[in-house]
Amino acid sequence: MVADVSHLMRRAFDERARSSGLSRPQWRVLTMLRRHEGINQGGLAELVEVEPITLCRMVDRLQEAGLVERRADPADRRAWRLHLTDKARALLEEMRPMAFSLFDDAMTGLDPAERSDLFRMLERIRTNLSRRAPQELISNG
């Protein structure tokens, strides 16, 4: 059931986001980066659950589009810290109403208490299945 709902949400997001020029994987990278600004590429790859080389290519494209910038890590000259540009922040804000609308459509028929219960249960499941806490990823990358 969770896989079915996830698939339908992804498909609906893709349909709605088509005009933005941003793919769902790119949206995911940007929103995760907004939450963990300054993370290194390895840590972000783990958070979005892709191979580091895959994330590197995604970041290359996002950097070419002017949405992400790589900054040298002051503690490790071989590493890069990732940051959103103002253009990315504006795009995320522009797409935010679309994402909320999709969420509202998906939650039609659930009262506020049911929504809260659903989130609480999903957060517990995510925590149960997570390999490492996000703070570990940020500091250990």
Image: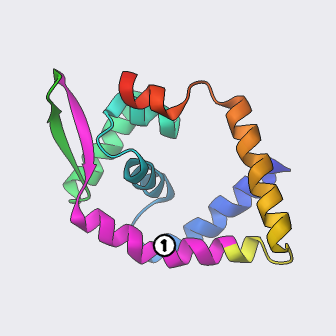
In the rendering, at what x and y percent does residue 102 appear? 64, 73
Q: Quadrant of residue 108?
A: bottom right
Is residue 30 positioned above or below 127 on the image?
below
Q: Which residues are magenta?
A: 78-103
The residue lying at 29 percent from left, 53 percent from top is 62
The residue lying at 85 percent from left, 65 percent from top is 114
In the rendering, at what x and y percent does residue 48 appear? 50, 40
Question: Number of labelled discs?
Answer: 1
Q: Nearer the viewer, residue 139 or 66?
A: 139
The residue lying at 67 percent from left, 70 percent from top is 103
- Magenta stretch prevailing secondary structure: helix
Asked if residue 36 can be seen in this view, the reply is yes
Is residue 108 positioned above or below 137 on the image?
below
Asked if residue 50 can be seen in this view, the reply is no
In the rendering, at what x and y percent does residue 46 appear? 48, 31
Is residue 47 positioned above or below 83 on the image?
above
Q: Quadrant of residue 106?
A: bottom right
The residue lying at 23 percent from left, 65 percent from top is 86
Q: Quadrant of residue 101?
A: bottom right
123 lies left or right of 117: left
The residue where tag 1 is placed is: 96
71 lies left or right of 102: left
Characterize the local packing of mark 1: few (<14), some (14-19) or many (20 or more) Cα atoms within 10 angstroms.
Answer: few
Q: Secondary structure at mark 1?
A: helix
Q: Quadrant of the C terminus?
A: top left
Q: Is residue 65 shown in magenta?
A: no
Q: Nearer the viewer, residue 140 or 62?
A: 140
* Amino acid at dot 1: Arg
122 lies left or right of 141: right
